[in-house]
Amino acid sequence: MIKPDATWRELPQGGIIPEGGTAALYETGDWRSKRPVHDKTKCTNCLLCWIYCPDSAILVEDGKVVGIDYTHCKGCGICARECPPKVRAIEMKDESDFE
Amino acid sequence: MAIVEKAAYTGNEAMAEAMRQINPDVVAAYPITPATESVQLFSNFVADGQVNTEFVTVESEHSAMSACSGASAAGARVMTGTSSQGLILMAEMLYIAAGLRCPIILAEVNRALSAPINIHCDHSDTMAVRDAGWIQIFSENAQEAYDNLIQAVRIAEHPEVLLPAMVTTDGFIISHGMEAVELLTDEEVKSFIGQYRATRPLLDVDHPITVGGLDFTDFYFEHRRQIAQAVENARRVIPEIGQEFGRRFGRFYGFIDPYKLDDAELVMVALGSTAGTARATVDGLRTEGIKAGLLKIRVFRPFPAAEIAEALGRAKAVAVMDRSDGLAGCGGPLFAEVRSALYGGKNTPPVVDYIYGLGGRDINVNDLRRVFIDLARLAAGEPVGQLVTYLGVRE
């Protein structure tokens, strides 16, 4: 893994990322201005949110949505949009409403 | 010594022959006058099975350089050719090719830029992309174009350089002018350039990498600093390879090519085909006892500032010949850099700029004599009146 304080002499040439699966190492959660809040009581576990999430931020265990990975969720709102209208288990709330 | 084969070639034919001998893995190109012929001839080699190249016909020069960058990142040895509007349509991708450290080789034919539209020689196109991170080598004739293209492969692919390189000829003057070119054998070229092994090819699926990732405030600066170092390394590598080429094949190359500079007082600085005309002018003036000399600059990027300052160390007056007008309001690009190279040195002679030959306007010995006569006045102590002169334009 590339260290955040690597000098230009230490970094790989050409800005390549020299290994796979590194997206998990890059925390994009602080880009978010709206936060998806998941309501387990309403959720039917259709997993549409999990399919559509561009950042793999919907956490699923045993076929059930168990939460949202706020370290990587950018707050795009696609999950809330794709959640079926009759279910509405995900609500986008302003980040300023949270601590 | 083996018998040297000579051929009557145009600059474009010499470029195409060098490309055939280099036998790159991928060529992606789009035709444009006066560079069309070199890639067209190369496409014949592909069709006739004389090379193993994957030839990608694309819909524009922007796409050509995009395909070249992708192929190079994948691990291929890649070449292309273009000119003028084609080169500046590539501009966005030229920067990307350099930034991704893709050692692509481009056979460029210098041609004026629109508007007004014109297909003839000047250096506006190559100068417009001088800050893209490409190595830029100018050729005086078809022989140099051939030799430079072969050396460019080694320079670009050098592990401490890994930058793309363009080798230029002057449109029509060299690209379509026929002359005797001494050729290397296919084996000699093959052994000189060697095999290309990309350090981190995208197609190495056992070692997956990402190319072209987002690079923000935390790393972008460091990556650009690496490119600056690669350019600095090229300053060492280019003359090393020019010397090796000379030892093996008899024609030596460096950053600059001084002509009768040892005792020259009046010195002309030029790029490309005009150097030949300047050499004839110097010879004529020498028979009259005038101490004239020529400094031909072969490599424009990296710019050989130290070599130029040293070569002009004894000059009493210097004329820089700019075949493009940067429209800076204070002279052409070659002038700005040559003059800057002399600042702070031991010898700071008067340096004046001549913008000439735009859109293919002919330049001859009489024109260049006029320049040396101006220099003689400056060397005699006459103050510099006009810093920038448009030579050969109807006043």
Image: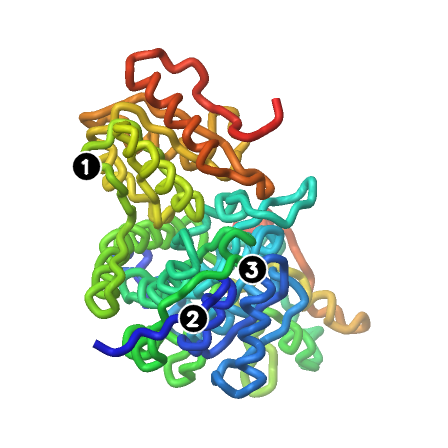
Q: In x, y percent, where is residue B295?
A: 31, 40
Label 1 crowd bin: few (<14), some (14–19), many (20+), radius 10 Å: some
- Residues marked 2 and 1 touching at CB (< 8 Å): no
Please identify the quarter of the rendering in which residue A9 is found.
bottom left
Which residue corresponds to mark 1?
A: B262
State the SS at label 3.
strand
Residue at 61% in and 22% down: B395
Which residue corresponds to mark 3?
A: B82
Q: Is residue B286 left or right of residue B205?
A: left
Label 3 crowd bin: few (<14), some (14–19), many (20+), radius 10 Å: many
State the SS at label 1.
loop
Q: Earlier in the sequence, mark 1 or mark 3?
A: 3
Residue at 54% in and 38% down: B357
Foreground mark, 2 or 3?
A: 2
**Tag 3: residue type?**
Thr
Name above or below for residue B49 compared with residue B127: below
**Tag 2: residue type?**
Ala
* Image mark for residue B384: none
- Residues marked 1 and 3 touching at CB (< 8 Å): no
Name above or below for residue B5 compared with residue A32: below
